[in-house]
Amino acid sequence: MREHLENIKTLAKADIQATCSEAELESVRIKYLGKKGLLTGILRGMGQLSAEERPVIGALANTVREEVDNYIEERSRLLKKMELQDKLITEKLDVTLPANKKSLGRLHPITQIENRMKEIFLGMGFEIVEGPEVESSYNNFDALNAPADHPSRDYQDTFYITPSTLLRTQTSPVQIRAMQDREPPIRIISPGRVYRCDEMDATHSPMFHQVEGLVIDKNITMGDLKGTLAHFAKSLFGKSTQTRFRPHNFPFTEPSAEVDVSCFVCGGSGCRLCKGEGWIEILGAGMVHPNVLSGCGIDPEIYSGFAFGVGIERVVMRKYNIDNMRLLFENDLRFLQQF
Ligand code: DAH
């Protein structure tokens, strides 16, 4: 029996040393120490031994079991170490390789220019106010001094939701809301989307963006309007930019003007961008019409003000020399990634 136990120990040791993985080691453990294992069998058969033999063989069997246990543990530690070393060799990481490029998104050029415009006006003490895109025809036309038969309603035809509700054709109705809600002094800009029944072509889109401006206070003059827009143009297009006011007509301002900036490519001498003019038109402006003021409950004898409206797409196109407005709405990354 003693010999048998010694044999089992030797065999177990050899088996354990031959294992190459934790799984193999586990099956060796089961072979010797499992429920039906060789050593377990012997310990179970102790009852058949004589009273003298039993304690001696029992003690020996226990020692053998402990030793086999120890071999297994030792082997397990060694296998783990080998596995780690293996990993360290095969999963080598070259930290000098160039990293995968993470591509960050960017703001659309329309949003970039809109943000720049907001910054410029915030710097001059303006507040940003937004209005709804679904607007009453009263705020969009009548309150802006364009009654039902006014010709400007033709070229600003739009999408009607009901006969008295429409998609706004301009950001100017936000002026009306501001004057109805607030007491002068008022100094706001209002950026947003506007809509017109226009076919999409190189210079038109049924949806585009404007930034409206409105200032109402005592003693506001055309000089304030000119100074404000001159500062705006210099901030947006460069310090040497000049502004020019040309007489125009808008129902809600009197007098009204279209405002040009000196061409920021040629500086005014004439080039392809400004079509030889030296000037580029960027916005409409004027002194708020007394009818508009009184319609909103502001006394035109006490207060005066100016307003202006800039088309953002037009500025983006002029600034970056883009000749087709469609490019701004197609969202082709090859185009957008240039900004
Ligand atoms: N609403 C005008 C348009 O869409 C732009 C404009 C012109 C706005 C003059 C103004 C203004 O406030 O004073 O064509």
Image (cartoon, helix red, strand yellow):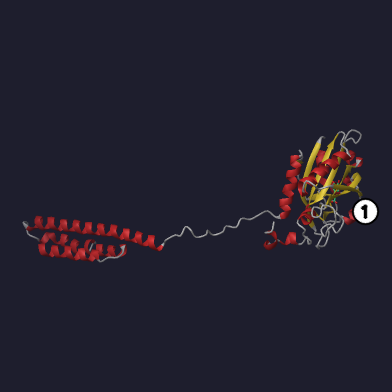
Residue 84 visible, this orientation: yes
Left or right of 66 on screen, residue 316:
right
Residue 128 visible, this orientation: no
Q: Which quadrant of the view contains residue 50? A: bottom left
Q: Position of residue 251 (x, y in %)?
A: 91, 47
Beta carbon of the mark 1 residue lies under 8 A of ligand 1: no
Q: Position of residue 333 (x, y in %)?
A: 67, 61
Left or right of 247 on screen, residue 308:
left
Left or right of 67 on screen, residue 303:
right
Q: What is the quadrant of the N terminus in the image?
A: bottom left
How many C-alpha atoms fall within 10 Å of the one at disc 1: few (<14), some, or many (≥20)?
Answer: few
Query: Which one is nearer the viewer's eye here, 132 or 326?
Result: 326
Residue lying at 89% horizontally and 42% vertically, measured from the top left: 287
Rendered position, 285 above or below 106: above
Number of callouts in the render? 1
Q: Position of residue 49 (x, y in %)?
A: 9, 60
Residue lying at 88% horizontally and 56% vertically, measured from the top left: 155
Q: Which quadrant of the view contains residue 322? A: bottom right
Residue farthest toward the left in the current orientation of the protein: 52
Query: Which one is nearer the viewer's eye here, 88 or 128?
Result: 88
Q: Which quadrant of the view contains residue 65? A: bottom left
Element type where label 1 sits in the image: loop
Left or right of 162 on screen, residue 122:
left
Rendered position, 37 above or below 314: below
Amino acid under label 1? Pro
Residue farthest toward the front in the current orientation of the protein: 269
Residue lying at 17% horizontally and 62% vertically, measured from the top left: 9
Q: Position of residue 45 (x, y in %)?
A: 14, 62
Name the residue beneath numbered marker 1. Answer: 151
